[in-house]
Amino acid sequence: MDLSKRRLLAAGLAAVTVAGLGACASSKNDSARRSAGDFTDDAALTAKVKSAIATDAGAKTASAVNVETYRGVVQLTGFVDSDDQVTRAVSAAKKVQGVRSVKNDIRLKR
């Protein structure tokens, strides 16, 4: 897959992620702790991380990895085929500006 197609795919994944996050409801307790700005910042960061994973690790890895962000702390979950996919996804997430830390809970398929 050439670079322009990868970038287009990454942008599409980011757009879908942001749209999906807008439909998520937060709990009453979570709302008390996070401002609207915090929630928006986390949603944008999630989209950037998802896009970075798609660009650096590939669309297959990006579709298998779930990304959640809370106050700049990114949690990666899901199941992938290889250690290389895990390493590339974590590395891509750490490179995104605004990410404070990355919690890796990605598992290998057995």
Image (cartoon, rainbow, N blue to C red):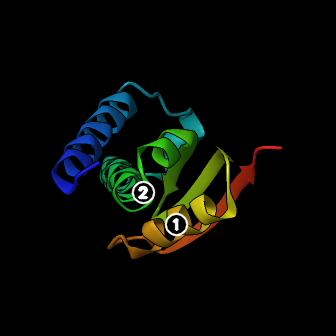
Q: Residue at x 62, y 61 (%)?
A: 86
- Circle 2 SS class: helix
Q: Which residue is mark 1?
A: 88
Whole-percent x and y of residue 38?
37, 55
Q: Which residue is mark 2?
A: 53
- Vertical placement of 96 versus 69: above or below? below
Mark 2 or mark 1: name the one nearer the start of the chain: 2
Q: Nearer the viewer, residue 59 or 12?
A: 59
The kind of residue on which mark 2 rests is Ile
Whole-percent x and y of residue 9?
27, 41
Rounded to the nearest angstrom, the CA distance separating label 2 from label 1 is 7 Å
Q: Residue at x 38, y 34 (%)?
A: 21
Q: For the residues labelled 2 and 1, say whether their Cβ atoms are less than 8 Å apart.
A: yes
- Vertical placement of 20 versus 101: above or below? above
Asked if residue 28 lies left or right of residue 72, the reply is: right
Query: Residue furthest toward the top?
Result: 23
The kind of residue on which mark 1 rests is Arg
